[in-house]
Amino acid sequence: MPIELRVISGARAGAREVFAKSIVAIGRHPMNDLRLDAEQDLDVSGRHAEIRITGNTATLRDVGSSNGTKVNGQPLTGERALFDGDTITLGGAAGAALEFHYVIDVGEASSAPPAPTNIDVAPPVTDPTRPAAPAKPRRDTTARIAEAVELQTGQLRRLLYGFGVAVVVVGLGLAWMSRRNAAADRATIEQLLRELQAQNAAIAQLRGNAGANGLTDEVSRITRQRDSLLSVLRQGGNQQGISERIAELNRQQTAAGAVSKVDYERIAEQNTRAVAFIVVQHGDNIEGGSGFGVTRDGWIVTNRHVVQSDIDGAPAKIAVQFHGTKRWLPARLVKVSSSDDLAFLKIDAPGTYPTVVGISPSGGVRPGAPIAIIGYPLGNETAGMGGSIDTLTASATVTVGVVSKSVSDIVQIDAYVAHGSSGSPVFDQRGLVVGVVYGGPTEAAGRIVYSVPSDRLIAQLPGEAAGVVRP
């Protein structure tokens, strides 16, 4: 059944959108179905909540937001059904509020189903002698909007009062610090200026390598930070804080310099053909992901969550398409890991298929090490550059970054991924797989990436793939 969401507060107040799909994702990230303002609705997470529609019932659940979700002013825990006219509040004072409605055609009104029951409370009554609970009364729309506005303005008032006190305290503190630092040693400031200006040559060298190695955005970001620090120093900013920021800037330049020395073209040439675009059908839903070949006869590694749904279980259909090809190959789910976000597929059609160069143990991976990720971020939008999924030629994307953390059960990476990157292989500078991407926190906007370490993958590889492991 179609639903309508009306934005009653926040940057998009007054907007209305109708959806006729089984899952409606809500948040600030561009991949959501209902996209809220990324610059102004700051209490709304990148992926905040989702509405699932089954038959004639819609249910709402929070998907790990930072500031929580409320329905009619009550905090949402778990999952609950939505009634026509319910108010959904996302986050706090800098969030947004929505009004939920079912959309029923006039011609079908006589046969429209009853309003859904709330599945978030006690289970259904099974005793036939026990009377049914009375239906939840509909509240006046004006009252609901007034309640949402009062909630938002009350929080805003408290925030403004707190901000005003903070401004006074900070102002007094700055005045005191200004007097204290008036006689600060100018030699220290001049030394910091020289350190920043000395980085020009290093940044210029990085910029020369950026085009070939995908570092353009990173070098631009480092340059902007350097220029900002120069401006603050020239205005007499806090020396200790700036010294720490310069040290961090040096660390970023060192990491970027290591990345710029890696031969990513060689890594891509050796492995990209083995990276597959995976399409999975669960009921009426079709989702995309990434994976990579590990045997010549068609074994493929991907994520468990790419091919297995928490609601629908095993997929109805799976098809894969290797980079640079147009042929869709039917595949089946053979094995799912019980301990990690890993799954193993097998292509049905006999043949010889491409594989990655090898898989290396991840025990030697250290923070700061350069890596490459090859996959299909944003799914069909980049795999076929917006073309029809039936006619596209799969084209994988190569992104670069560095390892930021490595422990026994996770390799954390500073790089870019998006929806569709799940299942992508992570390569070290030798071109060997050291991890399998499975996600990251939504508030990181795709810049903090989690991957399953290759040690855990190697322990679960099928016997046929033992030859792909390298020292």
Image: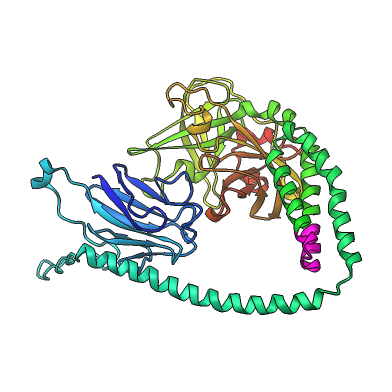
Which residue is at 10% across, 40% downward?
107
Q: In the rendered image of this protein, does residue 312 appear above or below residue 155?
A: above
Magenta-span inclusion, residue 287: no
Q: Position of residue 363 (x, y in %)?
A: 74, 50
Which of 362/220 is in front?
220
Q: Is residue 352 above or below residue 196?
A: above
Q: Decide whether residue 239 is among the magenta residues.
A: yes
Q: In screen coordinates, is 430 left or right of 417?
A: right
Q: Residue at x 80, y 60 (%)?
A: 234
Question: Residue drawn at (39%, 74%), measured in percent from left and top?
Answer: 154
Q: Is residue 115 left or right of residue 418?
A: left
Left or right of residue 314, residue 352 in this image:
right
Q: Is residue 54 visible?
A: yes
User: Quarter-wise, where is residue 9 in the image?
Assistant: bottom left
- The residue located at (66%, 31%) in the rendering is 356
The furthest residue to the right: 187
- Magenta stretch bounds: 232-247
